[in-house]
Image (cartoon, rainbow, N blue to C red):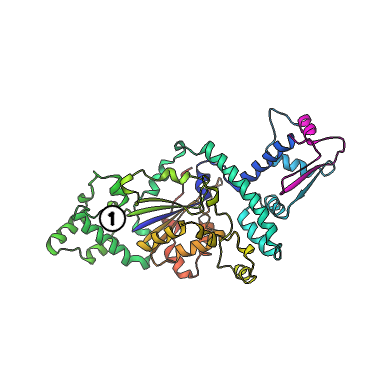
Amino acid sequence: MNRIILVGNGFDLAHGLATRYADFINWYWEKYLNHLRMCHNRTYSDHLCTFILNDNHNTWSALLWGILNPIKLPSGQEFYEHIKSDEKNFTIHYSAFMKRICQSIELKGWVDIENEYYTALNEEYFETPEKINEEFEIVKSNLIEYLSYIQEKDITTSIIEHKLQEKILSPIMISEVAISARRQLIDFIQARSTLDEQHLINESALSIHDVLNPDEDDSRTSEFIRECINQMEENGTVSTSIIENAIDNDIVPDSMLYPNRLMLLNFNYTNTADLYIPQCPNYKDKFIINHIHGTLKDHASIIFGYGDELDDRYTELVKLNNNDFLHNIKSIKYLETDNYRKMLAFIDSAPYQVYIMGHSCGNSDRTLLNTLFEHKNCLSIKPFYYVKEDGSDNYLEMVQNISRNFTDMKLMRDRVVNKTYCEKLLDI
């Protein structure tokens, strides 16, 4: 039995990293401001937007050096808001895609750039996808530059949260397993019971706990383990009834419930998740990091776009018979590397539990998430929720998003762990 952990942007945010799209846009305006301070013309453009100084007798450089306080510069967003509000002295022309991004932040206070791209692809550029793809590539290039800056500056071993590490490496709780997966749970415990008597000779069946704690042997103090050993000595196997009784009475020791293998499926471009992979050279197959959307050290590997083949609009895009509409569709881009194939091999290899850590489970990854959630080997889906400043949390919002990745709602209700057995991502 394995575990696959979906790592999304909330994982980086929990470590205090400024990786929201809104943070990126603020940085973009700060970068823009720095260019304007060096601009000796009345007009500056970077293909996403154009800033025009209406004063014919001035330049951006002369104006900004004269009015900005060099000790305390405004934030990028503050600078943009000021320029936008002063229509008498300044004019801003946006590309259509950049205008959507700015309008989203203005109306909602946040933006989902990938979702805006997909919406624009369907609504505004139905005949000319080339233009939006060009603009999207410029945004993508800027995002890579920003996140590379954040990674180099802020992502070090000092940000590791040990409580989070404990959750990643924790045993599988019986209460978390779907009712329909009871047979698989029994088989797993039965195999572990047999292996315990054999002193775990079969290395492929070692749990992650066995690998990280090779000298620990406290499981034999368990009454359940002793009963299993007695049965092994008498009958050569452990009866299903003993295991079912242990499950019903919740007396299976934690030492028998650790997953055999662990995969961190990282949807982020940053390497924060890598900090949580134990360094076990002899057991690399036990602890796997899969950068499903690529990494910042290899810009060509970055997958930035949309992935929802279940959406009716996607079918309409396919019917247009124009490959430019499919240029940034994730499910197609996955074929450029073997990361998706490795994920499929992992979930096909054995029953698995899904942990959701910081991933919103929104529609931009719907195709992949549907594959994970409705796979026959999926035993349960446990969302780790975020507690807001007012004391409320986003558990219900996460479950609502998770439900959109299912086509079978009965299966969804069985596999998603109810809030009673879920927990916060971090106690902060």
User: What is the three-letter code of the residue carrying label 1?
Assistant: Ser
Q: Is residue 331 left or right of residue 105?
A: left
Near mark 1 (Cα within 10 A), the count class, few <14, some 14-19 or many ≥20, is few
Q: Residue at x 29, y 64 (%)?
A: 186
Q: Residue at x 22, y 53 (%)?
A: 200
Q: Does 57 appear in magenta?
A: yes
SS for dot 1 = helix
Instruction: Determine the residue located farthest toward the bottom in the rendered image.
Output: 319
For this orientation, the residue located farthest to the left is 234
Q: Residue at point 31% right, 67% down?
A: 183
Q: Nearer the viewer, residue 227 or 120?
A: 120
Which of 309/84 is in front? Answer: 309
Residue 309 vertical placement versus 169 (above, below): below
* The N terminus: image quadrant: bottom left
Q: Position of residue 153 (x, y in %)?
A: 54, 36
| Residue 417 seen in render | no
The residue where tag 1 is placed is 204
Say left or right for 255 vs 310. Answer: left
Highlighted magenta segment, given as a residue range: 38-67
Residue 6 % position (x, y): 46, 54
Residue plotted at (49% across, 64% down): 370
Give the image quarter of residue 303: bottom right
